[in-house]
Amino acid sequence: MAKFKKSSKRHLPHQSNGIKKFVFGLLIVVLALAVLGGFWFLSQLGPKDVDYRNLDYSTEVSESVKALQEESLALESQFEDVLALRDPAADDILLLKGALEKQESYLSLISGVDSEAQKRVVNLRERYQNLAAEPLRLESLDLEREAEALVEQEEYESARSKFREAYQKQRQVNESFPQSAAYDVGRATRLERQARYLMAVPLLERSIVLEEGADAFIEAREWEPAEERLQQAMALQDQLNREYRGTNQSSVARLERLRVKLVGIRSGQSYVEVQRVVQLADERRAANENLEAAALYLEASRLQRQLNEAYRDSPYASSERVSEYQRKSQTAESFELGLAIERNHDLMQALLAERRTYEAAEVIVALRRDIKQMEEAYPRSSLNDEDLQLKVRYLNLVQNDLGFIQDRIYDALLPIPEIEGWRMLRTEVPQALYSLIMGTNPSRNKGDVRPVDSVSWVEAKNFCERLTWILGQSVRLPTENEFRQALGPLRYLVLEELVWSVSDAEGVPQAVGAKDAFASGFYDLLGNVSEWLESIDRFDTEDARHIGGHAQDRLESIFSVPIREAPRGERNRLTGFRIVVKVD
């Protein structure tokens, strides 16, 4: 018995949980039914479908109300009688208006629905508004035509008044007769815009006249009246921008331009003073009073800088003028030093041309010193010549080798048959000579006595320029005519003895002068490396030409003296050059 009781107590919690689940489920069901009942109740409160077929239209209408419709019909009948005889007048249209009003009163008093009566109201209203609006529409059109005629006669004020009246008529139509065919919001807007436009025209014309007057005073340097008129012109343009937006006369850009011009007027006196000082400086410069001119240019630069800071938006403000006046000041101040540099340069040229290299070296040192002083003391002077600086810097670098280089070049020159004043290098330029002049060797087929190769036409011209500096004489590439004159006739020549070709050069250029010379004394005019020619008959953008064939050409091809073209910056391991030198 005790065991049974112990077992019963063990099952009591499970029984309690089952009762709780049952109660909880019952609550959920009740809550769901309550929600559904609420939705049904709300649906009953909303609008319901109406079956118009079952409506009762048999509402009784009183005799007095029926009389209103009969009066309306009678008035419309009277109007129709008039319409059959003549065009309706204003009083006749009132009959139609009365008919409309009676019909509207009838509809407002009946309790049921009379669709036929409602349609009649709509028709009467539209008909009445069309007839009542037509005189106003015609008046508005006539006024618009009169306004346009006045515009053609440039009577803008009268035209503006007519456009305004036309606008008022159209506006009256739009407001009083919105269901008429004459209703036109767009036309009213256009007429109003035309009236506003004609109001703006005289303001703009007045502003332009004032601006032109200001310009005349500016030209005469009469600043006060110029400023007064320009301010008046600006006030009118500002009024146009504020009150007549959307018209052609409104212009923010013009107002800004006038403002800048006003700043220019206020800065004009300062600019006149700057120009006065510059004119004095020019006069001193023309009189060779360079130090006074330099001081005046410097003062003009200071005044221009002040103008720039005070009137940043002025058309007379210019940082370029500041730099220009500083340049003129330093140019005038450095004039004597510039003359000394020019004299020493001419002397150096003459000494080098006469092969007096030791004396030339002393002049180069002095010239280098003066040029350095010019660069440091007067960096803005227009007498600073970058090309001259480069030239003297190079000659200063090679001054100890000037005599050696000149001797080597002159010893290797030969006259060109039937060409006067020029001599040509008997061989192609060897790599040793190129390295001595240029400080570098671009060749792929290395060897001091081999011709320089892989050198572009531009680089060959740079070589000629440097050699011109050293010799004091003009140096350039040969022309085709000079090359052919040096080559002479090829008939009866044994090319194998004169030319390096694919048959014996192993595909690479060989040492210059290793084979026999041509009759004129020149070596390797054909074969070995093809040689750049002077481009005297070509634009700088066109390709350059080289002549004579190279070590990879066959003898048959070399015999034809081939001429090839290539871009001026192209490098080729089978292309080199030789030079010609001017000889006085």
Image (cartoon, grey):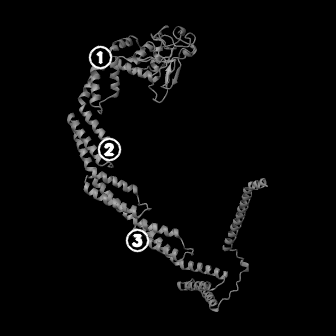
Residue beneath label 3, please?
Answer: 158
Residue 291 shows in the view? yes
Above or below 449: residue 87: below
| Left or right placement of residue 496 versus residue 306 in this view | right
Q: Tell me if mark 2 has few (under 14), some (14-19) or many (20+) residues whose alpha carbon lies within 10 angstroms of its own.
A: some
Three-letter amino acid code at the position of disc 2: Ser
* Pointer 1 or 3: first along the chain: 3
Three-letter amino acid code at the position of disc 1: Ala
Q: Secondary structure at mark 3?
A: helix
State which quadrant residue 259 falls in: bottom left
Q: Secondary structure at mark 2?
A: loop
Q: Marks 1/3: CA distance?
A: 92 Å
Three-letter amino acid code at the position of disc 3: Ser
Residue 365 x/y as whole percent: 28, 19
Above or below 95: residue 267: above
Foreground mark, 3 or 2, reads: 2
- Tally of numbered tags: 3
Residue 189 x/y as whole percent: 49, 68
Residue beneath label 1, please?
Answer: 361
Disc number placed over residue 318 in the picture, else none: 2
Residue at (71% x, 83% y) in the render: 56
Above or below 348: residue 50: below
Residue 375 x/y as whole percent: 29, 28
Q: Tell me if mark 1 has few (under 14), some (14-19) or many (20+) residues whose alpha carbon lies within 10 angstroms of its own.
A: many
| Left or right placement of residue 496 versus residue 481 in this view | right
Residue 468 x/y as whole percent: 37, 20
Quarter of the image with the N terminus is bottom right
Q: Marks 1/2: CA distance?
A: 45 Å
